[in-house]
Image (cartoon, helix red, strand yellow):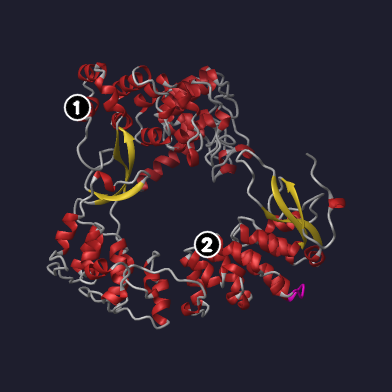
Amino acid sequence: MTEPTLADLEPGKVSYHQSSLPLWSVFDGPDPALSFIAACHSRDPHCEDLKALLAEPQTVKLALEEQQVVCHVERPPTKHSNVRDVAVRPITNLQRAVNMAAKFNCPESIRLLLNFAAQTCNVELRDLVDRTIIVAVIESGQAQTFNPLVTAYPPALSLNLGDRGLPLDFALDQNHLNIVTVLLEHGVDIRSTTKPFRRSRWSDSRLFLGVDVYGTQLSELLIEQGFPVAGSGALHHAAEGGRTVAMQFLIERGAGLDDDMPANGIQGNENERKLLASWTPMHAAASKRQLDAMALLRSSGARDDILDAQSRTPQDVLNQSERTLDDLKSLPSIYASTRGMWEVLLGDDLALSMTEAALAEDVKSLQELLADPKTIALALKEQHTIYSRDGPRADKPMPEGWSHVSAMPYTNLSRILTLAAINGKAEAVTLLLSFAKKKCKLKLSSLVDRMFIVPIARARQTAVFDAVVAAYPETVRLNLGHWGYMLDLVVNFRNWDMVATVLEHGVDPHGLTKNRRPRGSYPSSWLCWAAGARGTRLMEVLVSKQSLPVKESGALHRCSEIGALDTMQFLLDHGADVDEILSEEGITSQKKALHASWTPLHFAASRGQVEAMELLRSKGAKEDVRDLDGRTAAESLELHEQAGKDE
C-alpha cells in the first residue's frame, strides 16, 4: 500500500488516511522545522537549544508556517501492525511544538513557547491551548505540564471539554488528583463539578480526596475551601487505606481519634451503615489489616477498647480479618507479613522437605525426593511467595517484626530453586534444573527469567550462575527488561567472573546497551575493567577469545596502578608495551593530560606499587621518562611516600 501525498490532501480541511507516521509529525515530505520541534522536547531541563532558536528572528516565520500534520492516531488493528488510521490537517509549526512539548512532558518548553507565541508572534493563546492539548495532558496526568498551560492561559481552567465536562470533571474521572491539586491551586472551587462525583463509603465529603494521594497538599487546599475535618470520614478513609502521612496531617488538624460516623453519611445498605457508624478509625484500619495505621492511631492516643455494633474491639476486628487463601490475589500484590524473602506468604510450605534439602544442599536426600513420582505434582503446585520486602520507612511505621511485602503465585519448584540459588547452593540448583527439564517436562526458559537471575547476580553467586548457564546456555543472552541484556546486568554489578562466563559463551563484548559502556583507554576500556577482576580469567577471555587488542587499551597501566601482578604478566606475555604512553584523546580520567604523559611505571609509582615497578623494570621499562610535571617514576614514588608520611 502506498501512502498518500500532499496532492491527495484538501487544503484547510481534515482528511483521513492510513499511515505509520507518529502523532504531530509532518504527513508528507521533509520537515523544515525538525530542529525546532526536536528542541521543544529535549531532555535538557533548561532548554538552552530552544532559547537560542526562539531568539533568532527567522524562527517567527518558521513557527507560523503551516504544514499538513498528523493530528490524531487510532490504535493499530493488530499489535503487529504499524499502519493506523490517522487524521491530517494544516497546523502551524508553533502549535505542533506546543503539543510535542506537552506529549513529552516538558513544562519549561511549554512556558517558553507560550511566552514566545504571545509576545513575539502575537498569537492568541486560545488557538494553542485548546481542547486537544488539555484533554491529552489531563488524560496522561502530567501536572507539571498542565500548570504552565493554565498559568499562561487561565481560561483553560474552565474550558468546555465536551462530553468530558470541565477540566475538573475530567481530572476527577481519570483519578488524576495531581491535576485536581493544580486546579485548586489556581482557585477552581471543588464544588464546581458538573459530573457525578465519586464517593468514599465513609462519607460524601470531598475531603477524602486529599488522603488518596501521598502528601497533604490536596487536603490543605480542600480545608482552605471550607471542608471541615470533623465528621468528614477522612480519617476513617485514610486509616482503612493505610495512608499514614495523610492520617498524621488530619490528626494535627483536629480529626477525632475515636469519632464514629453518622449513619446517614455512610454509603451502603442499612446493616452496613449501622456497623460502619459504630466504627472508630482504629476499627477501619483493623478491618483491612493496616497495622502501620493502627500503630499510628495508638501512639497518637486512640483508644483500642471501644466496641462496635457487633461488640468487637479493633483487635477483635483485626483477628477476624486474618487473611485466608481465598483473600489472596492472583496478580502481584502488597501484603503485611512477618515472613521473609522467598518464603510462602500464608500457610505452610507444602514442599518443606524439598526446601530444607535444597537449602542444606543435602544432595542424597534431594535426589531421593526428586526421584519420587509424587514430587512432580508437589513441585508444580503454586503457593503465594514473597519476592520483595520493604525496609523500614518513616512514613509507614510497622509493628515490630512486620513489613510490607510483595507476593504472587509461584510454583514450589520455582520458589525453592530461587532460594537455593541466592544461598549459593550450586549443586542443588543443578539437580533442580535437571528435574524440571527431564521429569517435569518444563522449558528452562520458564524458570530462568529476570526474577530468578537478577537476585543471583546481586548476591554474587558465581558458582550458581555457572551452574545455571551450564544447564541453560541461553541464559547469557536473556533480555532482562530495564536491566538490559545479561551482559549489561553482570557489568552493572561488576561481577567480573560472571562477565567472563557470559563472554566465554560467545556474547559480543561490544553488545552492551545500557549506560555503563567501555570507552577509550585508561581507565574505562574493557581490558581496564578486567584489570580489577580476580585472577586473569576475564582478561584471557577478552584477549585470547574475543581478540581485543592490548595495545592502547590502558590495561597494563591500570594493572600497574592497582598492583595486579598476575594480570600484568599475562599482558606482557601478550605484547603489552612496557613503556607505552597513551593518547590523551582516549583517556577518560580527570587528570587526562597528566596521565597521557605517564608510562606504566609512573602509574605503579603513583600508588606505591613497588612490586609492580620491579616487574616492569625486569621487563626493561625505562626509568628516565619524565611526565608532564617533569617527574620520573622514581620521583613520583617519593612524592607518594612523602604524602603518606604527612598523613
Amino acid at circle 1:
Ser
**Label at residue 353:** 1
State which quarter of the image contains the N terminus.
Answer: top right
Is 20 on the left-hand or right-hand side of 384? right
Where residue 144 appears, x then y in whole percent?
54, 65
**Mark toward the start of the polypeptide (2 vs 1):** 2
Element class at badge 1? helix
Element class at badge 2? loop
The correct choice, above or below, for 549 with respect to 490 in the image is: above
Residue under the point 64% across and 68% down: 131
Furthest residue in direction right, as rendered = 7
**Label at residue 252:** none
Amino acid at circle 2:
Gly
Where residue 637 appears, x then y in whole percent?
45, 37
Residue under the point 45% across and 26% down: 475
Contact? badges 2 and 1 (CB < 8 Å): no
Give the magenta part as a residue range: 119-123
Residue 273 versus residue 50: which sits nearer the camera?
A: 273
Q: Is residue 160 covered in magenta?
A: no
The correct choice, above or below, for 127 with respect to 486 in the image is: below
Is 407 on the left-hand or right-hand side of 595? left
| Mark 2–mark 1 distance (CA, rounded to whole Å) | 50 Å
Q: Is residue 564 visible?
A: no
- Residue 436 sits in quarter: top left
Residue under the point 23% across and 43% down: 346
Disc 2 designates what residue? 141
* Disc 2 crowd, CA 10 A, few/some/many (<14, 14-19, 20+): many
Residue 323 versus residue 475: which sits nearer the camera?
A: 323
Is 50 on the left-hand or right-hand side of 571? right
Q: Main secondary structure of the magenta part?
A: loop
- Residue 550 sits in quarter: top right
